[in-house]
């Protein structure tokens, strides 16, 4: 007998944690509980739980996948995007998830109902990952092997696609004895910075990989980079050049996005060919002279991870689909792992507090926050 708020698996299999069954085919007709975020006075994040319609197969467009969310992952953008200076919206801001395929669009190939997956939802659009069901474009849905937990899998999607966009993917002969494409990853302790390093290590031609880090140096050491430089050092530019062994530095990926990092990036990048990549626009700032970048003819690139969905830049969605296959293979053979995480308390009710901690880091650390949907008190009381 199907109980309220509970779903029966197509195969009758329990979840990896064994505490609730997964829905693959049968849906209880009631509404879902979703977490919405907004700012009443632009100073305090408000999180409210509201009922939303349950997504079903007919809600899918041809290239979309319906996912029953087991674990949702939180990102700093979930805190930022409701602000007036960003998008000033009131939405269910979740974009990362892991769970099981509950439906597939008519043009989707390679997925079946019941498959374990992680998914990256289209940012700032309805049907995000903070209720029990979400919709993701097929090109950013990742098949999962049996060895990775739902919690670890939920740390991947947005961060790893962000890290993938600026990576140096040029091909050349891997049989050469020495890697001669130095890569500097600034803010390596963050999820995006860590995934940038993990992806770079998949290419034997990228190296030496030089990371900058602060208090979370132990985590960066676990990534086994070629060198770690303290970003607080007054000689950071020279320290990085020394670590590069005299090779020209043409790739600087800034996962920290600070004015200070732009200044020392300019000091270490090769004139004319150096590329500074950030996830936020480069704006004038009194700490550094933006003209300095022009004098050295450096290329400043601002990436937007949403390109893997909307394709506003040519090839964006195709790149997302191709990168999904790279990630799938790396997960299957064990060469790629997730980011350190902490499970938020009380399911969806705890997301607001998790986002505040993600922003202010009062307790320190570099962990991501993930949420088990089944831990929501409202979910438990319905079971």
Image: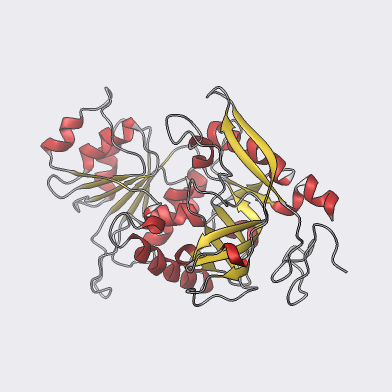
The image shows residue 119, relative to residue 45, as above or below, that is: below
Indicate the quadrant where residue 23 lies.
bottom right
Q: How many marks?
A: 0
The image shows residue 243, relative to residue 316, as above or below, that is: above
Q: For this rendering, which residue is in front, 372 or 139?
A: 139
In the rendered image, is residue 337 in sight? no
Q: Quadrant of the C terminus?
A: bottom right
Q: Residue at 30% across / 56% down in the picture?
A: 208
In the rendered image, is residue 10 in sight? yes
Horizontally, is 217 left or right of 72 in the view?
left
Indicate the quadrant where residue 361 lies.
top right
Q: Residue at 43% across / 59% down in the picture?
A: 198
Q: For this rendering, which residue is in front, 235 or 152?
A: 152
Q: Quadrant of the N terminus?
A: bottom right
Q: Residue furthest front?
A: 58
Q: Position of residue 15 (x, y in %)?
A: 73, 66
Q: For this rendering, which residue is in front, 56 or 221?
A: 56
Indicate the quadrant where residue 60 lies.
bottom right
Q: Residue furthest right?
A: 1
Horizontally, is 283 left or right of 188 in the view?
left
Horizontally, is 303 left or right of 21 in the view?
left
């Amino acid at each position: 007998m199907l109980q309220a708020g509970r779903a029966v698996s197509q195969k009758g299999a329990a979840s990896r944690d064994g505490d609730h069954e997964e829905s693959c085919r049968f849906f209880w007709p009631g509404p879902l509980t979703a977490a919405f975020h907004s700012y009443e006075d632009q100073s305090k994040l408000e999180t409210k739980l509201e009922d939303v319609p349950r997504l079903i197969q007919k809600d899918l467009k041809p290239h979309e996948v319906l996912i029953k969310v087991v674990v949702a992952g939180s990102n700093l953008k979930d805190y930022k995007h409701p602000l007036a200076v960003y998008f000033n919206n009131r939405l269910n801001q979740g974009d990362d998830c892991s769970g099981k395929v509950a439906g597939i669009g008519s043009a989707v190939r390679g997925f079946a109902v019941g498959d374990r997956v992680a998914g990256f939802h289209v940012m700032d659009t309805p049907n995000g990952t903070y209720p029990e069901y979400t919709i993701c474009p097929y090109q950013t849905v990742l098949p999962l092997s049996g060895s990775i937990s739902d919690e670890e899998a939920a740390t991947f999607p947005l961060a790893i696609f962000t890290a993938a966009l600026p990576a140096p993917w040029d091909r050349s002969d891997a049989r050469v004895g020495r890697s001669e494409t130095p890569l500097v990853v600034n803010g390596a302790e963050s999820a995006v910075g860590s995934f940038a390093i993990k992806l770079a290590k998949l290419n034997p031609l990228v190296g030496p990989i030089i990371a900058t880090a602060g208090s979370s140096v132990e985590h960066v050491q676990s990534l086994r980079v070629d060198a770690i430089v303290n970003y607080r050092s007054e000689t950071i530019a020279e320290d990085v050049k020394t670590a590069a062994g005299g090779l020209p530095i043409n790739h600087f990926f800034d996962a920290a996005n600070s004015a200070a990092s732009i200044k020392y990036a300019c000091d270490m990048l090769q004139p004319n060919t150096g590329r500074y990549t950030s996830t936020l626009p480069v704006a004038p700032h009194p700490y550094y002279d933006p003209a300095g970048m022009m004098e050295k003819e450096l290329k400043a690139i601002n990436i937007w991870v949403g390109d893997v969905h909307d394709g506003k830049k040519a090839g964006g969605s195709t790149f997302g689909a191709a990168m999904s296959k790279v990630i799938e293979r790396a997960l299957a053979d064990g060469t790629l792992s997730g980011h350190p995480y902490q499970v938020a308390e009380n399911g969806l009710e705890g997301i607001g507090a998790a986002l505040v901690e993600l922003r202010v880091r009062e307790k320190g650390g570099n962990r991501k926050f993930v949420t088990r949907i089944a831990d929501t008190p409202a979910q438990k009381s319905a079971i």
